[in-house]
Amino acid sequence: MLQTTGEGKSLDLGASTVPPEQDLIRELERRVGILNSAEHQNSEFSASVKGSFKEAAVWLAIAGVMWIFCLVYFR
Amino acid sequence: MAGDCRRHVDFLPRVFPIKVTWMSIKMDSANVAMQRESVAGRLPVLGSERVYDGYLSFMWTGVTFAAATYAFLIGGALPFVGNTKLGLIGYVIGLIVGMVPVLLGMGIPSFRTGADGIDVVKSSFGVRGAVLPLVALLAASLGWTYVVFALTGRGAANVIQTVEAGTGSANEKVVVIVALFALLVTWLFASKGPRMLERLANVISPGHLVVTLVMLLLLVYKYGPGLWNMNVDPSKALTTDPHMALAYGIEFGIANGLSWWPFAGGLSRLVKRRGLLMGPMILGQAVIGAGFLAMVASYAAVAAGTPDPTIWMIQLGGRYLGTAIMCFVLLANIATSVILIYQAGVSIQQFRLFARFRWPWLVALILVPGVWVSFNTQWTLDKTMTWLAYNGTVFAGFTAVSFVDYFILRRQVLDVGHMFTNSKAGKYWFWGGVNWIAVLVVAISIVIYLIPYDPITLAVKPWFRFCGAGIPAMLISGAIYYLLMKLFAVRSKGAYPEADGRLSAQAASSPPLTL
């Protein structure tokens, strides 16, 4: 039942009860605060996704070349 | 005075060591409970809590998702497009074309915010309108999970029958026992959360690859280089037109690629680095998981004269090796079910009733209908597969809406807090909590998809050979969504960057958060 979290602690998904609603909301507010913080805005999570678009373009180009090859070769 | 205080504080652990330890344990357990609520619940996942940090581990999860028994079934069906090579190449092309917009439109916003895909699409469908993608997600994840159980049960019984050279129908008792066993083991693994999912994938997927490679070598050994030119009898083929055969292959691939839409957000929020979002998943799922398995399955199906993997694997590998391979493949189904159930378990918590259950009990609750499925596997395969084929048609529209909304209309800016509010003052309230334009566009996309192509009968219009169904459905519905939103919404609803000042000021307030 134990799994290691990113901080190296053990996370037991089965042992404890679900936290009360108000605790969850407080935690949600804390996390939203972190996500809106300047630190997060400057982290990799908020960085430009140009790299992903470049990768997407490469994959689509591969698919396109295969497609054209089939259209031409298998006439 | 300050020194006195510090002395008192320093002194505390020595006087009340037990109390201090108890307090730290209590704080630690609260912290752990919240981490659990993020990875196995709807709280946004923070960077330190994310599971996937390596290229291979995320790739193996993609392989695991794609490499269930259904990959062999699809592969076995590909030669029936009329040309095995074209069916296969088209399938891989379609997978790439289908997955790229899904990974961009759903993967990136979930990666950035740490929020589940259903919470992210509240920005395009509205906080209440997101129930539409939620229903589609649950239908897809639960539907496929039950199909995988049914396939596992029937597959095991078929293997036993083939090995014993029996003639009648498969032993139903074996079907039920194996399906129930798969259900139980899925619960055991899924109840341990996403870290177990990653570990399972790291073991199962390389094994799956080795097993498939063995099958390929056996095929080449048995049939020689002539294998690559094998096709089904033209009388059994869907078409004799090579371009139409290619179009069928591409369409099967696009449908499969788009079906990643419900899962792209849920897994991307567990990824630590942006560079892992695109490559590992396309390589793992499209090229290796679906493509490579489909290649082996399609040539094995043509060579054996049947698309049923439970028959051709035994024919190919013989009584012992074939059975061992099939057993591994059936076992690997459980890993796929674990991914599907994890996603269903997180997303179903949009209904607060389900969020009150502890994770293992929630997983058990989701799996309960699987008991009925275990006793009705043939019915499940007959009816659910048809239903899933039509359910899949909605994902072209979902992909178009989520992509256009996030990248073009919102210019990649989301307010996480407003995804978690049910208030009229929220940015994503639109009209009564629903963006009816997005709902309408999804309905239109289904019509566009079904005009040239029937996913059940596979009947097509003549012009299907030029553009298929999924690509025009995505492009046209994306264009319609953009136009309708520009005309009716972006200035007055949804807090888009083009909104007028009054709306921007209203949206700047922070309404109360809810889960």
Image (spheres, helix red, strand yellow):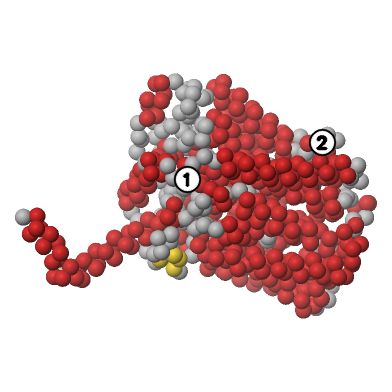
Q: Nearer the viewer, residue B236 or B377?
A: B236
Quadrant in the picture for residue B36? bottom left
Seen as rendered, the residue at the extreme left is B1
Q: What amino acid type is highlighted by mark number 1?
A: Phe
Quadrant in the picture for residue B132? top right
Q: The residue tagged with tag 1: helix, strand or loop? A: helix
In the rendered structure, the answer to whether residue B43 lies left or right of residue B375 reads: left
Q: Could you tell me which quadrant the N terminus of chain B lies in?
A: bottom left
Residue B262: image location, x then y, percent: 59, 47
In the rendered structure, the answer to whether residue B8 lies left or right of residue B302 reads: left
Q: Is residue B436 visible?
A: no
Q: Nearer the viewer, residue B217 or B30?
A: B217
Q: Residues within 10 Å of mark 2 (few under 14, many from 20)?
A: few
Q: What amino acid type is highlighted by mark number 2?
A: Phe
Q: Residue at x 63, y 44 (%)?
A: A55
Q: Is residue B504 visible?
A: yes
Q: Residue at x 63, y 67 (%)?
A: B204
**Residue hosting label 2:** B466
Could you tell me how far apart the alpha carbons at marks 1 and 2 are, in whole angstroms? 39 Å
**Residue hosting label 1:** A45
Which chain is home to disc 2? Answer: B
Residue B288: image location, x then y, percent: 70, 58
